[in-house]
Amino acid sequence: MRNKDRNSANIWLVRSIIFLILIIFGIFSYIILKEIHKKEAVENEINSLKLQAEKVKQENMRIKEKLSYLGSKDYQKMVAKEKLNLKNPDEQVVILSQRPQKNEEKVTPISEPTVIPQTKPISNFQKWWNYFFE
């Protein structure tokens, strides 16, 4: 009988140890899977930040090119001419205005008057008929 009690105690002990090992294995599996998920999230974040950094670099290059153009002598000359009404010493300025000229300078019209022929008014129906069938 003692032997049977020992056997039953040993079986109970083995089952308890196996159960504890399974619980520990489950906990470790959960922790490892959680870390793998975190690692993937961090890698995705790194990739998105790399793309964003590349976009920022391209934007910086575009802005640098624009700044170099805005600082160039050609652009400064253009702004001085257009906005400040300045000119180079060797340039001649010609001003073209859209205002009417004085009476003396106006171009005289042709002396022969043009005759506009009088046409008989046509009804709307006749206009459509002519449009489609003539």
Image (cartoon, rainbow, N blue to C red):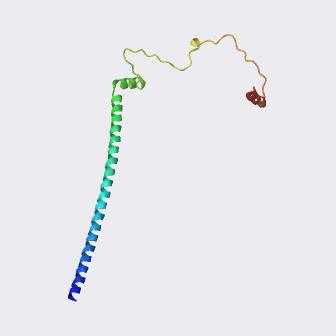
Q: Quadrant of the N terminus?
A: bottom left
Q: Give the answer, above or below, for where 134 lies relative to 48.
A: above
Q: Residue at x 29, y 59 (%)?
A: 35
Q: Give the answer, above or below, for where 34 lies relative to 1.
A: above
Decide which of 56, 83 is in the foreground and name it.
Answer: 56
24 sits left or right of 108 in the view: left
Q: Give the answer, above or below, for where 7 lies relative to 74.
A: below
Q: How many marks?
A: 0
Q: State the residue lying farthest toward the top.
A: 111
Which quarter of the picture shows residue 2?
A: bottom left
Q: State the residue lying farthest toward the bottom.
A: 1
121 sits left or right of 51 in the view: right
Residue 108, x across and y down, in percent: 62, 12
Q: Quadrant of the C terminus?
A: top right
Q: Residue at x 39, y 26 (%)?
A: 79
Which quarter of the picture shows residue 121?
A: top right
94 sits left or right of 55 in the view: right
Q: Residue at x 33, y 30 (%)?
A: 68
Decide which of 49, 79 is in the foreground and name it.
Answer: 49
Residue 130, x across and y down, in percent: 76, 27
Residue 15, x across and y down, in percent: 26, 77
Which quarter of the picture shows residue 90?
A: top left
Q: Residue at x 33, y 26 (%)?
A: 72
